[in-house]
Image (tube, rainbow, N blue to C red):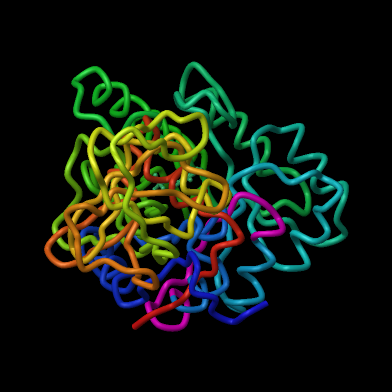
Amino acid sequence: MKPYLKRAWAEVSLSRLKKNVEIIKSLSSESTQVMAVVKADAYGHGDEHIIKFLYGNCGINYFAVSNLDEAIVVRNCAPDAEILILGYTPPEYAHEISMYNIIQGVVSTEYANQLVKNTPGTLRCHIKIDTGMGRIGLKHDTPQSCAEEISEITKIKKLSVEGIYTHFAAADSDDPNNIAYTDRQEKFILDTYDRLADMGIKLKHCHFMNSAAVCYRNNPKSTLARAGIILYGLHPDTSLAIPEGLEPVMDLKAVISHVKTVKKGDCISYGRTFRAEHEMKIATVTIGYADGYSRLLSSRGEILVCGKRCRITGRVCMDQLMIDISDVPEAKAGDIVTLIGRDGDDRITADELADIYGTIGYEVVCGISKRVPRIYID
Ligand SMILES: *Cc1c(COP(=O)(O)O)cnc(C)c1O
């Protein structure tokens, strides 16, 4: 493979990442440590590079991932870091969890028992409480009964319970009902933590903040801030602003491979969904849906060429797409174009693309495919 084939590539700015970390740290209290969420290949940014940089250059010592394979990548990049697996690991792999000194999220008493049965070592864990997300975790009507179940789990031999955590379902909303809902989720875990303390069980960690909570409802009682999307400079929800200074870390670029003039009535791309209404200058660009640039952007998305926005004409193909460059006479084959990022005074973000076709920035960056090399700049 060519080390840097100028076709379609993502530029990942480490200096912007570092600045985002500094802003997140400045938003958090002294009692809260930043836990970098690097699941899904660091939200598509390339996990090894991102983890090494966060660990070596940004003072990050806590990482969260979705599964054991991702956790082992973190362990290899960050030898002394604390690593939490947020999601499911089959109990058969418990010995690897202990061997790599990883912390597993535990979702039930039964699961805790299965894990310890499968490892000769001590298994470190944080217990997940479902306070309203409805996904995984212990579910109870009262903090008291929740604390009682956790208290029993702490008695399991070879299990080291180091914390409890929960996940907010709607912390990225300013709707009063959602705020009240999140308040109740937060109160439930804090009360559970206090009930445990009353029983003499003092846990090192109690955490519930995700990116949205860091931005809109910072609470010093959360010992960890599990920051994902804001680390990469995107919005938990585009309807709410994020703190000043957070910048998107990933840009997406491609080149113009071909330029032509089409006549009134000429069709562009599959299905003939685009027909020129007058003479136009059309450029072909070397990126398509197989690169993770969604076909849902057909005839809707815009691309920056020489600092100007150019509309996609017709359907996005697997490896290529066409744009209208009638207003950019200087554009020519070989020019670099910006699908995500800044060019001149204008900027297109992953959040903007997500809004066009009805998803979230998370899915856009996670969806940039393996074919697209990540180039680390600054
Ligand atoms: C993914 C995830 C996060 C990070 O969420 P962001 O919105 O990206 O900050 C935090 N906690 C849990 C349990 C998660 O699954």
Residue 138: tell me if it is visible: yes
Q: Is residue 114 left or right of residue 135?
A: right
For residue 31, above or below residue 334: above
Q: Nearer the viewer, residue 293 or 177?
A: 293
Residue 198 visible here: no
The mark total stands at: 0
Reply yes or no: does residue 18 show up in magenta. Answer: no
Give left or right: position of 16 versus 114.
Answer: left
Q: Can you tell which quarter of the image residue 41 is in?
A: bottom right
Residue 220 in percent (x, y) is at 27, 52
Rendered location of residue 16, percent (x, y): 29, 71
Q: Which residues are magenta?
A: 54-70
Nearest the viewer among 319 and 247 is 319
Does residue 75 sit above or below 87 in this rendering? below
The N terminus lies in quadrant: bottom right
In this view, 225 is above or below 78: above
| Residue 298 rendering spot, x and y as whole percentages | 40, 37
> Is 69 a magenta residue?
yes
